[in-house]
Image (cartoon, grey):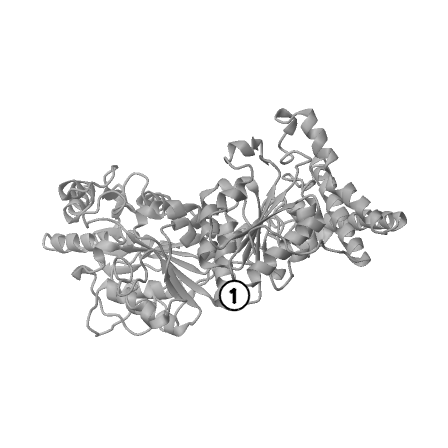
Amino acid sequence: MPKGKSQKNPKVLSQDELIRWYELMHMGRVLDDKAPNYLKQAIGWSYHAPCAGHDGIQLALGLSFRPGQDFLFPYYRDLTTCLAAGLTPEEIILNGISKATDSASGGRHMSNHFAKPSIGIQNVSSLTGNHAQHATGLARAVKNYDSDALVFCSQGESSLSEGYCYEAIIGADREKLPVIFVVQDNGYGISVPKKDQSANIDLSDNFSGLLNLFIKKCDGLDPVNSKEALDLAIEYVRSGRGPAMVYAHCVRIGSHSNSDRHELYRSREELAEAKHSDPLPKFRKFCLDQGISESALQSIEVANLHQHNEAHDRAMKAPNPDPQSIFTFVCPESWVSSEYPTGDHLSSRDPISMIQALNQTLKEEFRANPDTYIWGQDMANQDKGGIFNVSKGMQQEFGIKRVFNAPIAEDFIVGTANGFSRFKQEIRIVVEGAEFADYIWPGAEQIVEMSHEYWRTNGQFSPNVTIRLASGGYIGGGLYHSQNVEGWLTTLPGIRVVVPAFADDAAGLLRTAIRSKGPTLYLEPKFLYNSKLAYAPVPDNFAVPFGKAKIRRSGDDLTILAYGSPVHFALEAAKVLETEGYSIEVVDLRSLSPLDEETILQSIQKTHRVVIAHEDKVFGGFGGELAALIASKAFIWLDAPIERVGSEFTPVGFNRILERAVLPDTEKVLKTIRRTLAF
């Protein structure tokens, strides 16, 4: 079938269909028109993006969605879409006025972000169009599990300017995924006209070169034409030939939202033309022409107003969110091993490297759970398994459906993991978010997205994803191969951050990360991958709980708090100082978020002095948070200032001389400890 060409006869609606369609379209308009009144009365709905002028495509999209079977990612303007897809008027209002019983988020998320995960309508964020990544990832799971489901992704035309939308659509095209991208083009991105977005008048034309993408344009003002376009898209996607894009020409009758004044950038003539194009009276006339009586339409209108008023009354009586509830659903409870509840062991096995421990644990977890997956750049190409060989041999054992390469697109790697994990709770995903931690920044917005999914959805969804990142320096890598990123990651509530220093902890933390619900950032110090310093025996099924530090060396004179590579500098420094008569306690944090405050404070209460050693920059590094914690909760026990040692506040140089000048080492740790002991 040629792209965009219909071979169907015009859709013929029965009398019952016409009545139902008009009921939904009219009710959508009632809700849309009354929404601003809530803000005027200081009741709520402080963000409202009107859907008037999008009625045709939204009605058609909602009717195309099968509740409980398909998946729908609406955007903030999709009021009528969600109404037609299965939300009740009361649920729409509950969302608008942010009540505790709002099915989308319990009042946690912005109004006009409608959702009902229980029937497949997904909760999406306010980051314009980023749910395209999730839709593509979920469609990958649908295809992988041979499901009959379809994934619908709705968005405005201006979101197509975002790079992550290109990544999602291009990725769906390459993988021939069952996803339909519905683009509602009203000509503006807030106040920015299309001509400032794209050289093509229709942004769908920017994707015309994609091999497997079916593109169908339609009149988004006309529900019949829009439904015809969606039916063709569904038929194409079901054939397995690839994804589809339905590009609907709409009109924005009102302002972008209730905080926008469109008369500042639209002429009177344009506004008059937009109002004249209103789909509701046109469809009303169409119904009359098709034999529906005036009295029947009036009865629908009266009934809708009555239904709205009753829904309003019930919604107003609904409970508001409890202020104490802000602490619930921040992060799911992590899995804890009954065999190794503290992350300690006395194994007499031969020590292995950190690389071996990671590879071995991944394979064990993949054998234990057939719903475990891994992907990333260079993950599985013949005998190569990641640039550091962490995933070596995995595709050979577990197959290309579970272990596969991703494009060089960090946003796509992380974003599709979020989407894929939505298919069912048993799924566990491990992604190599970037080949080096320094390259994760294009995927940063998706990490932020993951961090608040559980809280934002009021506990209804959390992406079960472990993001592996090879972190840190000491390999002569220079810029983009030597940086640390934990100082930023630990500012995000809802996401765990762990850093092993030994092979056994590498295995144990990875097992806990994979088996736990929710997202974990797993930072692997690449300096330690094959270093003898990190060798350790790893017992069967070993696990390390989150938020549990380990005392690597007991002492009485000073505490060193460290994680990753500097744990070994601390141990070396403590050994040197032992010959000088000092007893140094080395605490390996292992888990930065959650943090083991109890072990930290108990150690400082005993030693009265503390040095914090980490590889990241001292200025702005995670050590600053540790220092603040100690100053707040352990100040009365301190006999000396809190000291920190880490990288200089410069990038890491490529020349080994420059690298050594920037990064911390044993001598720098020793110098800092001696200064603290001498105070």
Q: Along the horizontal axis of the image, is 555 left or right of 146? A: left
Residue drawn 38% across the image and 50% down it:
410
Question: Which of these two is toward me, 393 or 604?
Answer: 393
- The C terminus, quarter of image: top left
How packed mark 1 is, by other alpha carbons closer than 10 Å (few <14, some 14-19, many 20 or more), is: few
Q: As drawn, which residue projects farthest toward the right? A: 295
Q: Along the horizontal axis of the image, is 175 left or right of 670? A: right
Residue drawn 24% across the image and 51% down it:
560
Q: As drawn, which residue projects farthest toward the left? A: 579
Q: Along the horizontal axis of the image, is 604 left or right of 496? A: left
Q: Along the horizontal axis of the image, is 350 left or right of 420? A: left
For residue 620, say whether it is visible.
yes
Question: Which of these two is toward me, 538 or 21?
Answer: 21
For residue 80, say whether it is visible.
no
- Quadrant of residue 635 within the rendered picture: top left
Look at label 1 and name its amino acid.
Lys
In the image, residue 642 above or below residue 521: above
Question: Which of these two is toward me, 226 or 168?
Answer: 226
Pinpoint residue 395: horizontal percent, then vertical percent: 33, 68
Residue drawn 23% across the image and 39% down it:
648
- Quadrant of residue 248 within the rendered picture: top right
Pinpoint residue 157: horizontal percent, then vertical percent: 56, 41
Pinpoint residue 35: horizontal percent, then vertical percent: 71, 41
- The N terminus, quarter of image: bottom right
Tag 1 secondary structure:
loop
Q: How many marks?
A: 1
Pinpoint residue 264: horizontal percent, then vertical percent: 62, 25
Which residue is the site of mark 1? 424
